[in-house]
Each structure stands twice: as structure tokens, then as C-alpha cells.
Amino acid sequence: MLRVGLTGGLACGKSFVARLLGEHGCHVIRADEVGHEVLQPGGEAYGPVLAEFGDGILAADGRTIDRRKLGDQVFGNPERLAVLNGLVHPAVFKIQDEFAQAAAARDPSAIVVVEAAILIETGSYLRYDKLIMVICSPEQQVERAMHREGARREEVASRIQRQMPMEEKRKYADFVIDTSGTKEHTMVQTRMVYKELRRLSQ
């Protein structure tokens, strides 16, 4: 089994590349979706996060954690973000590891791809055999992010500014996929990366 991390800046096209890799035969799991799962009522991180951050992070139903409210408490505050990550990441890693083990049991040469936004910043990139970095220009990041529901330009720009600079992240990458061009160009790059991953996984 080959463990691969897939990361990149906000709205760079990670999910599109992840979908392409899945179509090629990789076993893909999205850390953001797992993060949602563990923060649901009954999820492994729900109780600890609620105890740490208080009822102010709850949605109008008084039960569900409102991720925007939670985000407002931690973005721009590295210490609080580190506390949140310390509560959420172990639960997320546990699910990811179970997913990878199940994939390897079915296929010993499986390529397991974990799509996650902050693999490098948290140091969790070290959990992977290879790292793929998805990049595009900052202008494209803003433009693409603004198409998302509820996006606010100031918030998008602020989030991009707070992330590790793209050039710094590139130093950690084994593969770089540039999504600045056409979808077809991204597909060609992804196919080339997949072929190399498949060679490495044999």
C-alpha cells in the first residue's frame, strides 16, 4: 500500500484532482468530510470540542456544531486552532487509518489518497509516503472561492493570507499539479502523477 497526501491552498482544485485520482483507481478519503463526521452529535470529537469551546458554537437547533461559529473562534488565533486540531485530528486519523487498512486488505498494492488542506502546516504530511501539491494563482483562488455558498471576499482573502505561502509549501511536495490552465491540462498532469504512483505502489 502507498499512502499519499493531497494538499494545496484554498480553492486550488484539490477536490477535482482527488476525484480524478479516484477515477483512475486510487482509494480517496477527504479529511474535511471526516472532520465533519467526527464533529456531528455522537462523533468522537463532538463532546471534547463542545466542552472546550462552549455552547456559543452551536447552531440554532442547540445541538449541532456550527462550523462557521467554531471557525470564527480559531482562525487568526494559532493557539486556539492548535487546541481544536488536538481534539479533532486524532479522531480523523483513526478513521483514515481504518480506511487505509481496509483498502490494503482488499488490494495490497492500493494507493490511498488523503485530501486535506493543512497537511504541511500541522506536520501530518509526515504520515504519508508521497505528497501531491495542487496549486494555482492567488487571483484564481479568490475567484474560485467566491463561487462557494456564503463566501465573503474579505474572509476569503484573509484565509488565503493566513495560509502558508504556496512557494513554501512546494518545497515539501513530491508532485505538483498546476490547475491554473484548462481542466484538460489538469487531467493530463493528474494522469501522469497517477502512473508514477502506480509504479511506486507495485
Image (spheres, rainbow, N blue to C red):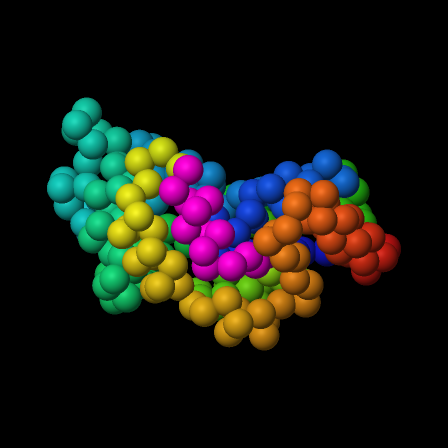
User: Along the line of sight, which residue is nearer the eye, 77 or 139?
Assistant: 139
What percent of the width, then of the height, locates residue 134?
59, 56
Q: Nearer the viewer, residue 185 or 70?
A: 185
Left or right: 74, with 127 as reference point: left
Q: Is residue 136 magenta?
A: yes
Q: Quadrant of residue 126?
A: bottom right
- Image vertical order of residue 25 relative to residue 192, above or below: above
Establish if 59 lies above or below 6. Answer: above
Is residue 164 placed above or below 27 in the rendered structure? below
Task: Give percent across and percent down for residue 5.
Answer: 60, 57
Q: Position of residue 33 (x, y in %)?
A: 47, 39
Identified at 76% across, 49% down, the residue is: 188
Q: Nearer the viewer, residue 106 or 159?
A: 159
Q: Quadrant of the C terminus?
A: bottom right
Q: Is residue 46 visible?
A: no
- Asked if residue 132 is among those painted magenta in the image, a careful observer would answer no
The span shown in magenta is 134-147
- Relative height, residue 17 to residue 61 (above, below): below
Answer yes or no: is residue 59 visible: yes
- On screen, residue 164 versus residue 52, left or right, reads right
**Picture residue at 15% right of the left edge, 45% below the top:** 54
Identity of the residue drawn at 35% across and 63% down:
161
Query: In which quarter of the view is residue 6 placed?
Result: bottom right
Give the left or right position of residue 50, taking residue 101 as reference: left
Residue ID at (29%, 44%):
152
Q: Residue 144: horizontal and vertical position, in percent? A: 46, 44
